[in-house]
Every structure is written in C-alpha cells, then in structure tokens.
Image (cartoon, helix red, strand yellow):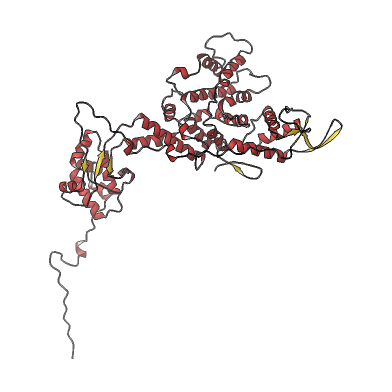
Amino acid sequence: MRVFALTMEGEVIGPGPYRATKLWNETIKLFRGGMPLRRHWAHFRCYDSSFTGSEAVDYLHELLRHNYNFGPEVTRYQTLQLLRKFLKAHVIEDIKGRHGTEDFEDNSHLYRFPTLSPLKSLPTRPLLKDSSDLPRLIRWDDYEELPQQENVAPIKSAVMTSDLWNKRHSVAIGDVHECKLIRRKEVTPKQVDHIWKSMTIAHLQRVLGLKTLDGVLNPAHVNGKHIVHNVVSVNKTGVVVLENKAEDMPYWVVSAMKCLAKWPNGNESRQPVYPGFERDVLRTVADYFQRLKEPLLTFHLYEVFVNILSLLQEKDVATEALQVSCLLLPPPNRRRLQLLLRLMARVCQNPQLPPLNDTIATRTLMVQMFSHCVLGSADDMDLDELLATKLVTFMMEHHNAIFQVNAKLRRQVEEHLSHLKRAQIKYAGSDTDFSASPAFFKQINRVESEEQKVIGTQTPLQQLLEGLIADEELPLKDKRKRLKQFQKSYPEVYHNRFPTEESKAAVIPEKTRLKPHLMLFNLKKPFQPFQRSWSFRA
C-alpha cells in the first residue's frame, strides 16, 4: 500500500511532476498555518502577531523533522537557510516591512507574515508532441535481412500455400493460409539497446505508479547504450567498469577515497599521517565532487528521483524504483555515485576513524557535505538541499541493494530477447507468431523439418505439437486425426513427446467403446424392425 504525505488541507502529495514546487507551496502553508504568533516588545513599541527569529527556527525545524517529505535528518542550519529563502521570497518580512535585502538571523529580531505570502505557480506540464517519440519494442518486420555468407548457397525461403500442402498430404483438413518459417536472426546491438530502453522505462512507470511520465521523464533523454553498459560492464563487486579511462575519476581522488574507506589501513601511498590528516583527505574528496558541473543524478532525471521520495517509507518499492532509475545514469555518473555512497557508508560505520568535525556528527557531516553533489535541479529549486538530504540518506543506507540490477527487469528483457531469436511461423499480413497464441496448428512439410535440423533446432515442431494438444476448440475427432498425421510426418518429434501409449492417453483420451454384453444389435447385419403379432378374442 502506497503511503503519501498529506498537506494541511488533506491533499495527497504523491508521485507527480514538479513535486518540488508543490512541496515549497505546501511548506509555506503549513508554516503560516501553524507558527505561533504573539505580542512582542521592541524599542519601547508593541508588535502584535509577530515572532522572533529563534522562535521561527525552533518551530520550522520541528515541523520539517516530523514531516515525512523531509525527515529527522534536517538540521537547524538547513532550517535557517530555508527561512532566509522565505525572507528573500517575501514569505515573511521583518516588523518594518523589509524583505529581500535583509538577512534572516537566528536571534530575537522580530518578524511577521505579510498579508499574503506568495506561492509559486506550478509550471505547465510539457506533453510529448508525438507518440512516436516514445520507444517502441521492435517487431519482426523491423528486422533487417542478414547478408549472405560467401561461398554458401542461399537457403530458399520455405513458403507453403494451402494447395501445395494439400497435394503433399492425403488427409485434407481445410484451407491453410500462406505461411513461412522465419529462422533465427541475430539481434543487433542497436536493437538490444532499444529493447532495454523501452522495457526499463515501462518498468519504471509501473513502479512509480504513474499513468504517464509526462513532465517526469523525457524518453529522448534516455540512452539505451548506457543501460546496457550499466547492466553488463561491471566488475566482481558490481561497480561499473568504464571503457574510456579518461572518463573515470582522477587517480588521486580514488586513492583518497580508498584511504578513508579502509582507514586506518588504506594509506597505500604511504603519506605521512599527522593530526587532522583524515580531515584533509575528506576535504580533497569533497572538493572534487563539489566542483562537478552537474549533480551525479543529472538534471534530466531530477523529477524522477524527487518522485521516488514519496516511496521511501516502503523500502522494497523505493529500492526497486532506485534500482531501475540508476540504470538510466551515464556509466561515469553511476560509477562515481556508487563509489561515493559506499565511501559514505563505510566512513559512518568505522569506529576507528577519528571525528571528522568538532561539532557535527560524522553521519550528518557526510550527508550535508555530499547531498547537493548527488541531487539538484537546473533551476536551483529552494527545497533542493532538504530533498537531497532525504534521498541521499536512504541511498547511503541501502546502496548495496540499489546498485544491483533489478532481477525482474533483467528476466523480462532476457525472455523477450530469447523470444525474438526463436524461429517462428509467420502468416501473411500478421505480425503475431504462433507462440503468442498456441491454440492453432499448421503443418510443416518434411523439407522444412530437414532444414530445421540443419539450423540446429526442432523447437518450432515441438511447439506446433504442443499447440495442437492445447487447442480446446478443436473437436476431439479432428485432433486425433491431426495427431496421427503429425506422427507420420515427424515420427521423431512425436515419439519424443509420446514415448508410450500411456503418455498419449494421459493427454488425449481414447475412443469410448461399448462392451459386448451391452450391444443391443448385431452391427454386422442390417437393422430389421421389431415385429409382434396381436390376437383378439371375440
């Protein structure tokens, strides 16, 4: 059952586009509706319906900590920063009516609410102009013909009409539409990328519980090659391996991260250790990530990860959503993010590591230092820091599970690719193969059977036989007739399916025969009506 945050009016803030703007407006409403106001004296004057800066920080800090959208990780300093944004946006003003140029202070300075605090208008949802922009799974008609190998005679396409079929078989079972056997073709890397992209986006939409991804994710910003690389090109620990080493982090950054992650045994370069050495190493790592041009989760995927915030109370659902979403990242970003979160978790769990700050706990310090390097919007949303804190905390705690490829998605893609590689029976004017509807049966001649042996499989014949057996609409008499015909045409396949009469009887019941003592008439003689004489007495 999905759990969403409730606004003061009882409105549900669930997954949806531009959620950060909605949260900004709702936070203002909650703050205005609950902040205690009273009379204050300042400079020998009385000010009604006012509050001090410290009172505002106290109240808003508790409000944010107990609001599920933000959580207990919110610090007092972050609350102070948000109130400064409120003052700049004229959500609040000082008692002289000043705002924008003044700086909010956590002290006894007096503030008040203006007559109406401005709310941000929700941006218009960008709709995809054409459904063709959405990825579509490839069909058989999308396949390109494979080039013929040199010095190899081309194999003639096995096309069989109903007339040809009836000529080759003594038992006529009706018209058979034109069909052909489509042999296995190699799926190109481009097609594999497209399938992974299509099925990953569809899986993400289902996990998020959205009817549409309009305003949340533009499929044009998803690269199928990135998804395939993130799934396939990983080392023994599950970290992405980059083909272009120039895209990787500098060696000195990797060394600094190893030093902290394996403290006190991670100083591979044998640098001299001095008091505060570990803090300098942390600053080296932080400087590198804070100078990145774009957050690791990218601007394009900002709305996707903000939507996941509403799922965090359901650990399994949120983990699955993050597993799928992180597959969309460029491989260098995914690698950096995974190594960073793993470093943060190890630092927080290492009791041998000295305190990295005199006043801030290590866990809080790590989240504050790196959260804005992970999640952020191109428009610098006012709640970015609070939302990033919430998301990064969850990802740090569950990073091992998040960076595993979702088993359900992988299985669905592999089954789909396997399906496309199988030989299929194709009918003119139809893009549906028989495996999608096993209820009908069409005969294949002996020539095709031999060709199937050449290409190394009899799976289509076996599937045809199973389709005939499973056909519930076919009369039992006709089914027996076709099975007998199949047995004559393909004895090896038939014997593998029915090695004994008992195995056949378990699937196809034998004909019902009358016992001799119950037979009323001798069927070898013509039927004669029953005669009886009647006598009447005078």
**In the current view of this chain or complex, which residue is farthest to the right?**
44
Please state which of residues 5 and 42 is positioned toward the viewer in this rendering: 42
Left or right: 298 in relation to 475: right
Left or right: 61 in relation to 349: right
In the rendered view, tell whether residue 509 sits above or below residue 129. Answer: below
Name the residue located 17 percent from the left edge and 51 percent from the top edge. Answer: 171
**In the current view of this chain or complex, which residue is farthest to the left?**
525
* Residue 68 in sight here: no
Please state which of residues 509 and 323 is positioned toward the viewer in this rendering: 323
In the rendered view, tell whether residue 253 sits above or below residue 165. Answer: above
The image quadrant of residue 72 is top right
Name the residue located 52 percent from the left edge and 28 percent from the top edge. Answer: 298
Q: Position of residue 405 (x, y in %)?
A: 45, 31
Q: Position of residue 372 (x, y in %)?
A: 59, 26
In the rendered view, tell whether residue 225 sits above or below residue 416. Answer: above
Please state which of residues 56 and 254 is positioned toward the viewer in this rendering: 56
Name the residue located 28 percent from the left edge and 33 percent from the top edge. Answer: 145
